[in-house]
Image: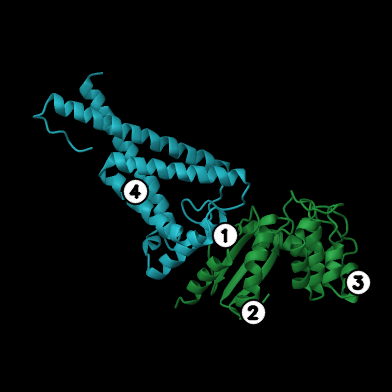
């Protein structure tokens, strides 16, 4: 998301069902996307890292990857995080894990149909990789990248400034502090 | 064991104890103040510049923030003060100056750290500890380690008071004898 040539690159390893990931998204990433990403200062990369303990996070990741393939990543990511407390296993709605209405609301009818077609073969609610589900290969790729860091918990994010990586940060934090860190990086010669 | 041998043994144990605590606090300060990109315990990690210091302190502030314990306005001042407090405590322990009082401060700090770690663990916060630098997980081992540090701090504090009392008794028994500083 943003300008790939931005001086700061931020890779976020997320799980759509993790409450701290939701908090990071709502409190920090949203204002960051609207400002530093939009201004070309930060290039934000989302990486899927569905944790085995979360029942519906991989299926959520598949929906977002399907949306990404039709150019609607941001809208569906936002819809799922905004409504996490409704569809997740910790949520208020029953039955649990019903995320399709939120995806549908974020897309036009034709976009939703295209996303649904991409989800064919990927509907089974399992945290295991489904052979024949093309969307899972993207998720597996991200998981493999996370394991190199190594990511053990979510959200974990790695900030790189002009190619130089900084230590991974785990957990949610406030946007003003992250912005201060970015400003200090950008003021470096 | 004679009184003199006991006194010498006590002094040696107290010396080892306070040096051990000093190492813990100096390592904690170093971990927070060193340049983020430098490999720990290398010469490059000692090349602290105002710019690298700013980055390290803000990075530590982000870690403090992830504990979700302080209001946003308090995070940065706390994070900017703590490494210097740890450095000062470490240096004071190293010199042995005002040992009893420094030991009390040390124990209070260790109690605070232990309490924070217990709280975060109980809340299942998926965060880094930030105790000895970036990229250090907060897990069950952190809980055990900080608990041991706390017990160690209390033991050294008790030792400092006991040795001070013995010094006083020895000094009043033989006022001509000049006792070495602790």
Marks 1/4 in contact by CB < 8 Å: the verdict is no
Q: Which residue is mark 1?
A: A169
Q: Which residue is mark 4?
A: B90
Residue A103 image position (x, y, % from top left): 83, 67
User: Which of the two marks, 3 or 2, is nearer to us in this view?
Assistant: 2
Chain B: what color?
cyan
Q: Secondary structure at mark 4?
A: helix
The Cα–Cα distance between marks 2 and 1, rounded to whole angstroms, is: 23 Å
On screen, A10 above or below B12? Answer: below
Labels 2, 1: one chain: yes
On screen, B143 above or below A146? Answer: above
Q: Which residue is mark 3?
A: A113
The first of marks 3 and 2 along the sequence is 2
Q: Is residue A7 visible?
A: yes
The Cα–Cα distance between marks 3 and 1, rounded to whole angstroms, is: 37 Å
Q: Which residue is rendered at x = 57% and y = 59% of the image?
A: A169
The Cα–Cα distance between marks 3 and 2, rounded to whole angstroms, is: 29 Å
Q: Residues within 10 Å of mark 1 (few under 14, many from 20)?
A: many
In the picture, measured across the screen, residue A94 lies left or right of residue B25, that is right
Marks 3/4 in contact by CB < 8 Å: the verdict is no
Q: Residues within 10 Å of mark 4 (few under 14, many from 20)?
A: many
The first of marks 2 and 1 along the sequence is 2
The first of marks 3 and 1 along the sequence is 3
């Amino acid at each position: 998301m943003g300008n790939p040539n931005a001086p700061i690159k931020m890779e976020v390893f997320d799980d759509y069902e993790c409450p701290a990931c939701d908090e990071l998204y709502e409190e920090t990433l949203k204002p960051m996307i609207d400002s530093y990403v939009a201004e070309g200062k930060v290039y934000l990369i989302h990486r899927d890292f569905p944790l085995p303990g979360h029942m519906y996070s991989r299926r959520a990741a598949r929906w977002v990857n399907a949306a990404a393939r039709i150019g609607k990543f941001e809208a569906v990511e936002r819809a799922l995080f905004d409504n996490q407390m409704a569809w997740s296993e910790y949520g208020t709605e029953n039955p649990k894990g019903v995320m399709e209405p939120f995806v549908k609301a974020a897309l036009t009818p034709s976009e939703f149909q295209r996303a649904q077609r991409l989800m064919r073969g990927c509907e089974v609610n399992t945290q295991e990789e489904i052979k024949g589900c093309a969307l899972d290969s993207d998720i597996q790729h991200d998981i493999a990248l996370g394991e190199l860091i190594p990511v053990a918990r979510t959200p974990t994010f790695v900030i790189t400034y002009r190619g130089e990586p900084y230590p991974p940060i785990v957990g949610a934090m406030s946007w003003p502090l992250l912005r201060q860190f970015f400003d200090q990086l950008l003021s470096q010669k | 064991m004679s009184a003199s041998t006991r006194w010498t043994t006590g002094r040696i144990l107290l010396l080892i104890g306070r040096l051990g605590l000093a190492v813990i606090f100096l390592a904690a300060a170093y971990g927070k103040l060193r340049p983020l990109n430098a490999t720990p315990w290398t010469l490059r990690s000692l090349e602290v510049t105002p710019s690298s210091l700013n980055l390290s302190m803000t990075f530590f502030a982000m870690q403090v923030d992830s504990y979700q314990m302080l209001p946003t306005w308090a995070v940065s001042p706390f994070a900017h003060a703590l490494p210097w407090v740890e450095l000062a405590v470490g240096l004071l322990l190293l010199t042995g100056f005002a040992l009893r009082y420094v030991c009390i401060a040390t124990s209070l700090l260790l109690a605070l750290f232990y309490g924070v770690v217990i709280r975060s663990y109980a809340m299942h916060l998926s965060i880094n500890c930030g105790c000895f630098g970036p990229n250090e997980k907060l897990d069950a081992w952190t809980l055990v380690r900080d608990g041991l540090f706390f017990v160690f701090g209390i033991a050294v504090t008790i030792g400092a008071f006991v040795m001070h009392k013995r010094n006083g008794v020895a000094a009043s028994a033989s006022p001509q004898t000049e006792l070495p500083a602790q």
